[in-house]
Image (spheres, rainbow, N blue to C red):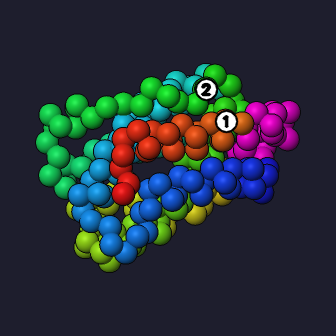
Amino acid sequence: MHTRLRDETAALHSVLEERLDLLAPGMELDRYRAVLRTFYGYYAAIEPRLQALSATHPPLGFELLARTPRIAHDLVALGCTTDELANIARCADLPRLHRSEQLAGCLYVLEGAALGGQIVSRVLEAQFGLSGATGCAFFAGDGLGTGSRWRRVLHWIDELVRGGASGDEIVVCARETFGTLARWVGIRGAPQ
């Protein structure tokens, strides 16, 4: 299922990476803050829905992590006030999240982003001297545990499909998640 998800979302993944361009050597700190604000608006909107959906389904086999607090920590570390944080716009255009397959498709994207964040965190450390404590907690994620967490998520998705879940629906929601996030990034104007 992982190979299918990777292949069938590759073009959308590329569009999002291009819009964010987080590995650009000339990225400025203000642009990084804008990216964090954009992510905060998306994650703060979607994570409560993920929590609610996962609470109504069988256990995932891994903890569903809230990454919004990490983004908030980074923004505050980089000078954002609590009032500014409270006023960051939240995304309303989110993927459908009513079924296990939709949860799986969305988690594939968000957990994959955490895996990719490991590369981004090294660039941010080299470029700005940031660490998990000083503005890079979101991208630093679970550190060395990120890879094993990713494997647990993929295993859960595979087991879901083996148990009769629709692989087609998982792919549709993964594509919707990439699409809604890319549109949000475009609306918020984080890159450039």
Q: Residues within 10 Å of mark 1 (few under 14, many from 20)?
A: many
* Residue nearest the viewer, comparing 131 with 109: 109
Q: Is residue 86 above or below residue 127?
A: above
User: Which residue is depicted at the point 32% across and 77% down?
Assistant: 126
- Would you say residue 174 sits in the magenta stretch? no
Q: Are marks 2 and 1 in contact (CB under 8 Å)?
A: yes
Q: Which mark is residue 96?
A: 2
Q: Quadrant of residue 122?
A: bottom left
**Numbered marks: total:** 2
Of mark 2 and mark 1, the one earlier in the sequence is 2
User: Which residue is depicted at the point 41% across and 39% down?
Assistant: 187
Instruction: Please give the range of residues in magenta.
Output: 155-171
Q: Quadrant of residue 24?
A: bottom left
The answer to whether residue 23 is left or right of residue 124 is right
Residue 102: image location, x then y, percent: 66, 32
Q: Which residue is mark 1?
A: 173
* Residue nearest the viewer, comparing 137 with 91: 91
The CA distance from mark 2 to mark 1 is 7 Å
Q: Is residue 119 above or below residue 113?
A: below
Give the residue type at disc 1: Cys
- Would you say residue 169 sits in the magenta stretch? yes
Q: Quadrant of the C terminus?
A: bottom left
